[in-house]
């Protein structure tokens, strides 16, 4: 139920005489506005006449004591409200620096500006109480403390890199830019402050979260668009407010646990919700078949980005509490694929699931999620789950190199596989999955042909994966080297072309590989440079580059450590003892490595990849 809808100037929403605060609930998403939104708001106020419309906010007013501070819960428009507060803080800071130059009227405006940010009843009672996500509330307090609006408050670590401080600094810079070189700086600042105060917002007050939900999409016209996950969360909490009044905080904690399992990456969160539905489509549709008796899948045959919200709206309306709990439990298991579940019971799955991620096997997570959730009913243990994960790794090595089956078919492949194993148990589950994957995979002949060709050109990702797998195969616990380690955003260990791939072939290589004939060297480069036999893994790629073969082989660092091909990787054993590098050696090494890859990623094996 809507209690009121009114168009207010900002000065009235931040009324210095009113004991009104705007509290952003802790379940709201963090402050996300950035330069484009800050710029638009600033310029809209600056370039338009007073009274310019800035958008709307939706509040829930549940205050019953008329003598107490009226606390309005902001359920939409928090980004805009926070930004206006930061703009006020920037204006206050600039005017405070010129306090000695202010006349009496301007001093009153300075005091009033402070009262827009804090109530008269206690200087530290904030007018806008930010959500706690990503240190928003503490960062905001630190800003107000720095400008002298509230008492001293310790600035949180790294606050300067986060958006609250960045927005404040942006407005400081824009105001300085606006008055730079002007003769009457204070008059311009006061005129701009007046424009901000006269700008208008529509404030909509409603009685409950359920009422607020129906207004979200249509009134979020100037903020960051709500994502599908935001809308699912809002719908869920609104529904729970109806079915279980007063327990929103509890269920928000449950929701946060789910997101804690999934991490902050929105694309991964959205993928989980699609995978969850696609994995358990049959059981999720069952209650709706009684109503929509003419439809096989009333909620939809497959979850996509476009229908995700509609699917979860119906699930939430059916039983919000039940679905939140089971989805949270599923999310905890999905976290295994994301390396975010450190339960020792699953340690056996660490390596194959990391490999599945590295070979870009995420489309199969819906199958792994189904197996993990249903493992007791399917009578499968961790060893069988490990075997299935290894099968999937083999499948994606072959698929990603041959493009068979095509990407568009993967979701339905894994959904169909779930249908096949749903009523099986034990080894029958493993064997059926193997049969299903083999039925759609490229033949050994096709796979071998791709391995023998310019594999790096076909897929650098698969190339890196198979080279790392070949290197790891000979490692022991004592000699283990993490070939997937990052430094910044780059791998420390990278693919090295032995015969270099650059446009200009060094003279030493022309002499070695083509008897001094530049044209022949170029021809060999075109036919052989990207073959598996001419590739290896090196931790010092940038240091090797176009150096001669001997320099690459024998290179040491400043401490005398071997960093060339004598770096102890068995993958480089042949290179470490070779005196020259030739076409015949590339062909021979290609044949050897192709044979090893065919064996390592043989899907017919009882225990592939293990």
Image (cartoon, grey):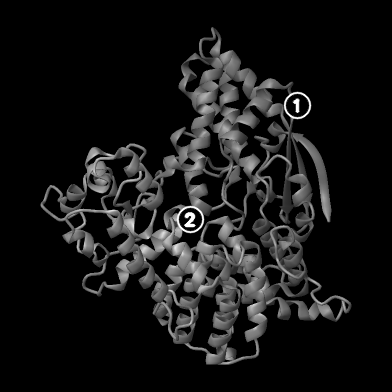
Q: How many marks?
A: 2
* For marks 2 and 1 on the same chain, the one whose residue lies earlier in the sequence: 1
Measured along the vertical axis of the image, is residue 438 above or below residue 119? Answer: below
Judging by the rendered image, the residue that carries numbered circle 1 is 51
The x, y position of residue 79, in whole percent, is 63, 43
View extreme (left): residue = 560
Label 1's element? loop
The x, y position of residue 107, in whole percent, is 56, 21
The answer to whether any part of residue 433 appears in the image is yes
Q: Quadrant of residue 589?
A: bottom left
Disc nearest the viewer among 2 and 1: 2
The x, y position of residue 334, in whole percent, is 54, 71
The alpha-carbon separation of the residues under discs 2 and 1 comes to 60 Å
For the N terminus, the quadrant is: bottom right
Q: Residue at x 68, y 28 (%)?
A: 197
10 Å crowding of disc 1: few (<14), some (14-19), many (20+): some
Q: Nearer the viewer, residue 571 or 355?
A: 571
The x, y position of residue 190, in whole percent, is 61, 19
The answer to whether any part of residue 336 appears in the image is no
View extreme (right): residue = 294
Judging by the rendered image, the residue that carries numbered circle 2 is 458
Label 2's element? helix
Q: Nearer the viewer, residue 429 or 113?
A: 429
């Amino acid at each position: 139920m809507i209690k009121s809808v009114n168009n207010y100037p900002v000065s009235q929403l931040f009324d210095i005489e009113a004991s009104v605060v705007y509290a952003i609930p802790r379940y709201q998403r963090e402050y996300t506005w950035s330069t484009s939104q800050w710029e638009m708001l600033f310029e809209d106020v600056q370039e338009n006449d007073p009274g310019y419309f800035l958008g709307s906010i939706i509040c829930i007013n549940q205050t019953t004591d008329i003598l107490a501070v009226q606390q309005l819960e902001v359920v939409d428009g928090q980004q805009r409200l926070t930004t206006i507060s930061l703009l006020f803080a920037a204006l206050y800071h600039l005017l405070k620096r010129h306090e000695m130059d202010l006349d009496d009227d301007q001093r009153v405006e300075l005091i009033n500006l402070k009262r827009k940010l804090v109530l008269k009843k206690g200087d530290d009672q904030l007018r806008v109480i930010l959500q706690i996500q990503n240190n928003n509330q503490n960062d905001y307090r630190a800003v107000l403390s720095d400008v002298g609006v509230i008492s001293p408050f310790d600035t949180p670590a790294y606050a300067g890199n986060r958006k609250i401080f960045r927005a404040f600094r942006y407005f400081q810079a824009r105001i300085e830019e606006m008055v730079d070189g002007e003769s009457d700086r204070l008059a311009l600042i006061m005129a701009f402050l007046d424009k901000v105060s006269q700008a208008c917002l529509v404030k909509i007050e409603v009685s409950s979260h359920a009422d607020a939900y129906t207004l979200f999409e249509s009134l979020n016209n100037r903020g960051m668009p709500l994502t599908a996950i935001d809308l699912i969360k809002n719908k869920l909490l609104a529904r729970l407010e109806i079915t279980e009044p007063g327990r929103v905080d509890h269920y928000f904690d449950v929701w946060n646990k789910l997101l804690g399992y999934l991490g902050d990456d929105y694309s991964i969160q959205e993928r989980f919700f699609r995978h969850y539905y696609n994995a358990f489509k049959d059981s999720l549709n069952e209650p709706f078949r009684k109503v929509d008796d003419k439809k096989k899948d009333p909620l939809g045959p497959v979850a996509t980005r476009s229908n995700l919200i509609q699917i979860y709206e119906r699930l939430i309306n059916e039983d919000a509490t039940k679905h939140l709990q089971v989805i949270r439990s599923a999310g905890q298991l999905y976290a295994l694929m994301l390396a975010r579940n450190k339960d020792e019971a699953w340690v056996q799955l660490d390596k194959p699931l990391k490999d599945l991620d590295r070979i870009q096997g995420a489309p199969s997570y819906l199958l792994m999620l189904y197996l993990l959730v249903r493992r007791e009913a399917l009578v499968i243990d961790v060893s069988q789950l490990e075997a299935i994960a290894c099968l999937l790794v083999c499948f994606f090595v072959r698929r990603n190199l041959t493009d068979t089956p095509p990407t568009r078919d993967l979701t339905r492949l894994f959904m169909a596989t779930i249908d096949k194993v749903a009523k099986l148990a034990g080894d029958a589950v493993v064997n059926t999955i193997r049969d299903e994957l083999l039925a759609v995979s490229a033949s050994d002949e096709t796979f071998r042909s791709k391995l023998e060709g310019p594999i790096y050109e076909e897929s650098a990702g698969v190339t890196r994966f198979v080279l790392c797998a070949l290197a790891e195969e000979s490692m022991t616990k004592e000699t283990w080297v993490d070939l997937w380690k990052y430094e910044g955003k780059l791998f420390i260990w990278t693919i090295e072309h032995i015969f270099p791939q650059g446009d200009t072939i060094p003279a030493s290589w022309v002499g070695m590989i083509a008897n001094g004939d530049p044209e022949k060297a170029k021809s060999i480069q075109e036919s052989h440079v990207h073959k598996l036999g001419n590739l290896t893994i090196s931790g010092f790629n940038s240091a090797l580059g176009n150096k001669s073969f001997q320099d690459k082989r024998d290179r040491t660092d400043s401490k005398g450590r071997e960093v060339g091909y004598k770096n102890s990787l068995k993958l480089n054993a042949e290179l470490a003892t070779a005196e020259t590098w030739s076409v015949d050696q590339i062909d021979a090494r290609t044949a050897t490595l192709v044979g090893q890859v065919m064996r390592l990623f043989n899907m017919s094996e009882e225990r592939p990849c293990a």
